[in-house]
Image (spheres, grey):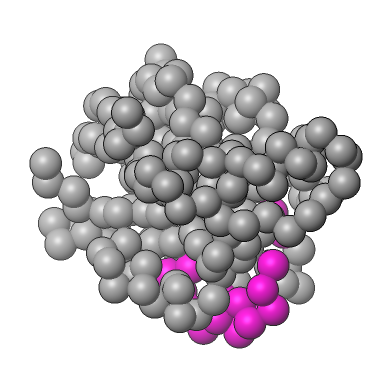
């Protein structure tokens, strides 16, 4: 399998919450080309400097412009093909930020040329919001990959107009836990209604991912394949 570009959402990579410069550089050194994120990217204060200085780290484009960082970047593959990566956040059950649908219109309108390969990480809680966005951008971008819920969905498909879609790509972490944390901590919270610190789970570590093939001449997706090491 010839992977030309690797994108990873990293917003919880530093001990389950947020990102540090040290962890970010580890991720990039491992072969990741672009890091996307979401609402938890702001959990560690030091990320404010890192996200300003590291162009390969994105944050949702529909956060206010006063925040550091950027929501899109374009990379040129060794073959000479340009690929734009964009990061946006949903609003249902999340922070009250700018409209992600209008943000997508702006991003699509800013592409250098048409067709151009454009890959989007839509970081959102509600499956309906993700599905609505998938249909909204179908045929206008190459792929819309959902993140945030940490549980991989089984609805990967290429939509009718050529956009690859999955509601949630899942997570990299310990599968013998609750979205990456120790089960006992999450169970306590649900049983009692009282929060206590969540500890990162350690058992049965694995990876969820998707592999997307795209026609570089049309910018349309050819296929999307769901991968998981979970047994």
Taking the spot 42% from the left edge, 47% from the top edge, the residue there is: 203
In the picture, measured across the screen, residue 28 lies left or right of residue 200, that is left
Q: In this view, does 140 lie above or below 71?
A: above
Position in image of residue 113 (x %, y %): 38, 50
- Residue toward you, 90 or 111: 90
Q: In which quarter of the image is residue 45?
A: bottom right
Residue 136 in the figure: left or right of residue 101: left
Q: Which residue is drawn at 61% across and 30% down?
A: 130
Position in image of residue 193 (x %, y %): 88, 40
Q: Residue furthest top?
A: 160
Q: Is residue 186 left or right of residue 37?
A: right
The foreground one among 190 and 26 is 190
Residue 44 visible at all: yes
Q: Residue at x 83, y 50 (%)?
A: 195
Q: Where is residue 61 in the image (x, y as percent from the top left)?
A: 63, 57
Residue 201 located left or right of residue 204: right
Magenta span includes 45: yes
Quarter of the figure that contains the C terminus: top left
Q: Nearer the viewer, residue 179 or 118?
A: 179
Up/down of 45 relative to 112, above or below: below
Q: How many marks?
A: 0
Q: Can residue 106 be seen in this view?
A: no
Q: In which quarter of the image is residue 123?
A: top right
The x and y percentages for residue 104 are: 60, 43
Residue at 44%, 61% (x, y): give it: 35
Residue range highlighted in magenta: 43-63
Q: Is residue 24 above or below residue 171?
A: below
Q: Where, quadrant-wise, is the N terminus in this rendering?
A: top left
Of 59 and 9, which appears nearest the observer? 9
């Amino acid at each position: 399998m010839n992977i030309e570009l690797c994108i990873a959402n990293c917003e919880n990579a530093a001990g389950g919450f947020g990102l540090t410069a040290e962890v970010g550089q580890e991720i990039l050194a491992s072969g990741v080309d672009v890091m996307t994120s979401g609402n938890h990217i702001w959990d560690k204060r030091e990320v404010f400097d890192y996200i300003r200085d590291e162009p390969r780290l994105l944050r949702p484009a529909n956060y206010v412009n006063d925040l550091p960082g950027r929501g899109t970047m374009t990379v040129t593959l060794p073959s000479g093909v340009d690929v734009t990566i964009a990061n946006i956040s949903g609003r249902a059950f999340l922070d009250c930020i700018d409209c992600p649908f209008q943000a997508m219109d702006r991003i699509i309108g800013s592409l250098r040329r048409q067709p151009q390969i454009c890959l989007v990480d839509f970081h959102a809680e509600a499956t309906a919001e993700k599905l609505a966005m998938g249909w909204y951008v179908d045929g206008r971008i190459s792929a819309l990959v959902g993140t945030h819920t940490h549980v991989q969905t089984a609805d990967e498909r290429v939509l009718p107009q050529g956009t690859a879609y999955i509601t949630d790509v899942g997570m990299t972490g310990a599968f013998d836990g609750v979205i990456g944390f120790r089960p006992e901590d999450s169970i306590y919270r649900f049983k009692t209604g009282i929060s206590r610190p969540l500890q990162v789970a350690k058992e049965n570590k694995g990876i969820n991912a998707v592999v997307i093939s795209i026609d570089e001449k049309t910018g349309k997706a050819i296929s999307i394949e769901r991968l998981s090491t979970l047994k």
